[in-house]
Image: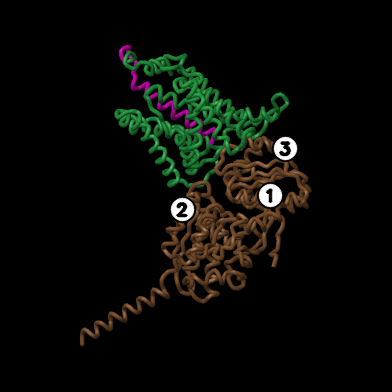
Chain colours: A green, B brown
Amino acid sequence: MSNLLDLIVAGLATGAIYALVAVGFTLLWQTSQTINFAQGEFVMLPAFLMLAVMHLGAPFWLAVLVGVLLSTLLLGLAFKMLLVDPMLRHGVLPLAIATMALAIGIKEAVKQFFSAEASPFPSIVPVGDVSILGRAISLQSLGVLAVAILAVVGLTTLLNRTSLGHQMQAAAQNPTVARIIGVPVERMILLTFLINAVLVALASLLITPIYLAKFSSGEVLGQAAFIAAIVGGFNQVRGAIAGGLLIGVVDNLAAAYVSTQYRAAVPMVLLILVILFRPQGLLGRAEERTV
Amino acid sequence: MRSIILAGLCSAVLLSGSAYAQSGAPIKIANVAELSGGGATVGTNWKNGIDLAVEEINAKGGILGRKIEVSHADSQSNPGVARAQVQKALDGEPYVLLGPGYSGSVKVTAPLAAEAGITQIMGGEAAELTQSGNKFLFRTSFGQQSSMPKVAKYINDELKAKSVAVVWVNNDFGRGGRDVITKEFNRLGIKVAADLSTEAGQADFAADVSKIKAAAPDAVFIYVNEEESARILKEIKRQGVTAPLIGETTLVGQKVIELAGDAANGARGHVGLTTDAPVEAIKAFRDRFVKKYNYVPDHNGLKGYLAIYMVKATTEKMGKVDSKAFADTLHGLTIKTSTEPNILMDVTFDQNGDIDRQGFLVEVVEGKQVVKQVLPKLN
């Protein structure tokens, strides 16, 4: 039983990171029908940007700030203006394929400019345990969970409680009407891309100390987050969050109670079941588009 | 008359050219290694070791007056790609084939080299590799059949462990090690409290470490590749497992220490080669390597370096560059540091291509490998 609690806490911590990445999937889909198959690589890249800044002699906190800023510019602004806008005119499928190419490009570039080898990455959460209900729970798991929850709460507050968030929702739900009532739709869409870039940078900061900085580490993350977004509901932020947490826990429990070899198959089975019996996802709404 | 003189001059030039091709042309050596993918640490160290040795030998005039020319190909840590790259390399008729480092890749490429009659000097450690009668395959480090009994003996004699959790990577390397050590544990009456198979490239070890905690073993034997070793060591520290952690070179290597940081402290293992060995020639090698590449190599850097000096010593023993006679010469050969200082330690190759050399038991203390015991050469 105590083992189960450890597994669930560790699963929730990993799942919270999946959730951050999955939320990015849903945001981009909502505002611009973009399925970003480079989302995993978007999580991998900020860690390398931060490492590059640290190699120049900057302290960790400064590297984080610069890394997040560079990620926002590269993975938000440049991604939208140089890839999404030109490709989206040709439809969703060419754009999806273009993001696959982008994923390969980012991976190879990181391999070329940094190294094919893994690098250590500092943790923002100290290593150690805290006692909860008589059980020693990893401080790092709790820290990751807390930061991810704060980010998600901040995002949902922005979307639901602020004028800016309402404008973003309006732009996502019906861009034509939103334009008529004066919502700067293009700016709202750009803002979504920037938010996605910040979310992936945050995910990168949280996951890389555990997974290590490596050019290929985005593959697993991107796939897990994509499954999480579909399982939870591609058209609902809360669905992506629930999907992320669920996949994190299911993956860990599968590794412990099914087998390590088949751990990757269990979330896939869940994905197939959801597609068969609830195609809109566990918390998604059929044919409805809200941020 | 002028045409006869011209023809004579042309013949002389052509003849001297062909003589040059035989005696002065570079010796072509092909290397196929894990330069990207999960084994990038292995392959990059191996390649850098090779390049350093080649640079040294060429600077001193080469082997028997001929320079060495090495080509590097990337197996991407994938046996299928390794096979294709080895085939391509063999088509270029190299003098010797070096690599790969992964046992699975060695397993699928060794028959190709043997068929071509080209000696393959590799980094794989799986026990089965040298037990299939291949007369062209040679190791640069101990096989599992040599190292695992020493590890099991240490766990039994020094740690007095009665139960051990075994964590292994589900590939030829990991399975081979797991099979040999569990056999040794059975022989010594040590119970395997948990038998945990993990995947190459696995990122999340939370569930595996939870299982170790639940099994509460006296010691944990970890036999996975370097990056995964670092990840599991971090997770073990995160979950507060206090049992002694024992492994092989892949648990206590430089890259693991760099990646795992504090979490590597206390890990112990048997290493055939380490740059922290109390051997002057190895210390000098380490200094040269650090000067050239600006990092401390792991055992794979040493393996790559030694592979080239194996080629040099064998060729000089033959007194000629003869790829067909190379393997026969190396079988049973003892290369002594007195005749070839850069072989670093006296080494003997048996008829299977396995090696006999002194080894070390090390512990990671404050981020450094500390040699606790020197295990002498058997013969």
Numbered label attached to residue B268: 1
Do dots 3 and 2 share one subunit?
A: yes
Task: Find numbered disc 2 in the image and state the secondary structure of the residue it sits on.
Answer: strand
Q: Which of the two marks, 2 or 1, is nearer to us in this view?
A: 2
* Apparent side of residue A59 relative to residue A173 in the rendered image (left or right): right
Indicate which disc, 3 or 2, sits on the residue closer to the N terminus: 2
The front one of B31 and A72 is B31
- Image position, residue B77 (x, y; %): 50, 49
Numbered label attached to residue A130: none
Determine if residue A154 is in view.
Answer: no
The front one of B248 and B374 is B248
Chain under disc 2: B
Chain under disc 3: B
Residue at mark 2 to residue at mark 1: CA–CA distance: 31 Å
Q: Which residue in the protein does label 2 denote? A: B74
- Tell me which residue sits at (60%, 29%) in the image: A11
Asked if residue A203 lies in the magenta stretch, the reply is: yes
- A139 over A184 or under it: above or below: below
Q: Which residues are magenta?
A: A179-207
Numbered label attached to residue B215: 3
- Tell me which residue sits at (49%, 17%) in the image: A157
- Neighbours of disc 1 within 10 Å: few (<14), some (14-19), many (20+): many
Type of residue at label 2? Asp
Indicate which disc, 2 or 1, sits on the residue closer to the N terminus: 2
Type of residue at label 3? Ala
Type of residue at label 1? Arg
Task: Find numbered disc 1 in the image and state the secondary structure of the residue it sits on.
Answer: strand
- Image position, residue B99 (x, y; %): 52, 58
